[in-house]
């Protein structure tokens, strides 16, 4: 286990380090916003020569409006894609298997009033609009590409799909999947419940850890030179394989033991905390 300052000191300068951070629950506070303190710390890190990227379940539109100073391609769709915001293009995807369409049709049949939302690399489409799909749009900070569309009209490969709903409704969906769906299809078991009112599904081979490996290759950086910041179970594999892992005090207990550094609470400006530790390493470099 290495401290942040030791990690930086061993590498000598920030150009050799890639800092990748989750958004919700890590950089973002409980008000679903990034504090000005965190924004200034991110910008300072980049200005000092650091490479910065995000790794999120969000999509292009719901990440872009946050105006995070990313100077490296970033992971979206919970590991389903890598997008270069500077170039405005998708550079890598890990789509769900085509059999997911049969699963979605079955779920729509049994839960017709649920707000199923489907994401491709270019858009996200609400298959059934209700108050929960409006709630999700508010959380994401952007409107869907299409509302009340048919699954057959979504022709691009599906990267992930979600259902927002009450905890009771989500429990029913999970129970149905557990009792009725074939686990060989690929990703029938719900992905990560990042919020009690949101159920996410990604491909069987798609997660933040796999995407982090792909990002390392794209950026020509070793995994051992990556600092990863995350707070929840969907960050588990990325935290596990990164050279140095950072979790906030408010993290899920399931990932706490993976943290080489346990930082401040998500409401107390985690990026500021991490940058201060980075500066200690720079001051003490050989």
Image (tube, grey):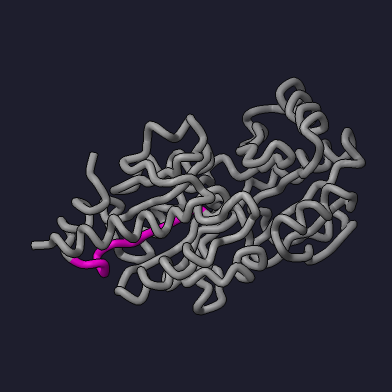
**144 in relation to 3, above or below:** below
**88 in relation to 163, above or below:** below
In-image side of 119 versus 127 (left or right): left
In-image side of 68 versus 138 (left or right): left
Q: Residue at position x 80%, y 27% from top?
A: 172
**Quadrant of the image occupied by residue 10:** bottom left
Residue 213 lies in the magenta stretch: no
Can residue 151 be seen at all in this image of the molecule? no
Q: 286 or 201, which is in the foreground? A: 286
Q: Residue at position x 43%, y 40% from top?
A: 237
**43 in relation to 129, above or below:** below
Furthest-left residue in this view = 286
Q: Residue at position x 86%, y 42% from top?
A: 114
Q: Which portion, as a residue range, is magenta?
A: 13-22
Image position, residue 23 (x, y; %): 54, 55
In-image side of 180 versus 24 (left or right): right
**Quadrant of the image occupied by residue 105:** top right
Q: 253 or 264, which is in the foreground? A: 264
Considering the image in quadrants, where does the N terminus appear? top left
Q: Residue at position x 75%, y 61% from top?
A: 155
**81 in relation to 67, above or below:** above
Q: 57 or 12, which is in the foreground? A: 12
Considering the image in quadrants, where does the C terminus appear? bottom left
Q: 202 or 141, which is in the foreground? A: 141
Image position, residue 234 (x, y; %): 53, 41
């Amino acid at each position: 286990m290495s401290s942040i300052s030791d990690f930086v000191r061993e590498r000598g300068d920030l150009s050799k380090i890639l800092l990748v951070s989750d958004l919700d629950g890590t950089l973002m506070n409980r008000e679903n916003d990034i504090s000005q303190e965190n924004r200034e710390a991110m910008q300072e890190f980049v200005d000092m020569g650091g490479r910065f990227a995000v790794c999120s379940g969000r999509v292009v539109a719901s990440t872009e409006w946050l105006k995070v100073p990313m100077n490296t391609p970033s992971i979206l769709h919970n590991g389903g894609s890598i997008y270069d915001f500077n170039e405005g293009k998708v550079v890598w995807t890990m789509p769900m298997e085509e059999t997911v369409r049969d699963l979605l049709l079955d779920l729509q049949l049994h839960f017709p009033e649920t707000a199923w939302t489907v994401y491709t690399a270019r858009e996200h489409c609400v298959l059934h609009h209700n108050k929960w799909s409006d709630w999700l749009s508010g959380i994401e900070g952007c409107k869907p590409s299409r509302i009340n569309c048919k699954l057959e009209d979504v022709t691009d490969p599906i990267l992930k799909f979600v259902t927002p709903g009450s905890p009771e409704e989500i429990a029913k969906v999970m129970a149905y999947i557990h009792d009725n769906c074939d686990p060989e299809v690929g990703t029938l078991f719900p992905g990560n419940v990042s919020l009690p009112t949101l159920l996410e599904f990604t491909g069987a081979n798609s997660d933040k850890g796999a995407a982090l490996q792909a990002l390392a290759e794209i950026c020509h950086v070793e995994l051992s030179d990556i600092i990863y910041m995350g707070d929840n179970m969907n960050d588990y594999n990325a935290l596990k394989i990164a050279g140095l892992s950072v979790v906030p005090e408010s993290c899920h207990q399931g990932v706490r033991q993976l943290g080489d550094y346990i930082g401040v609470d998500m409401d107390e400006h985690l990026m500021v905390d991490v940058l201060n530790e980075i500066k200690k390493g720079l001051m003490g470099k050989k």
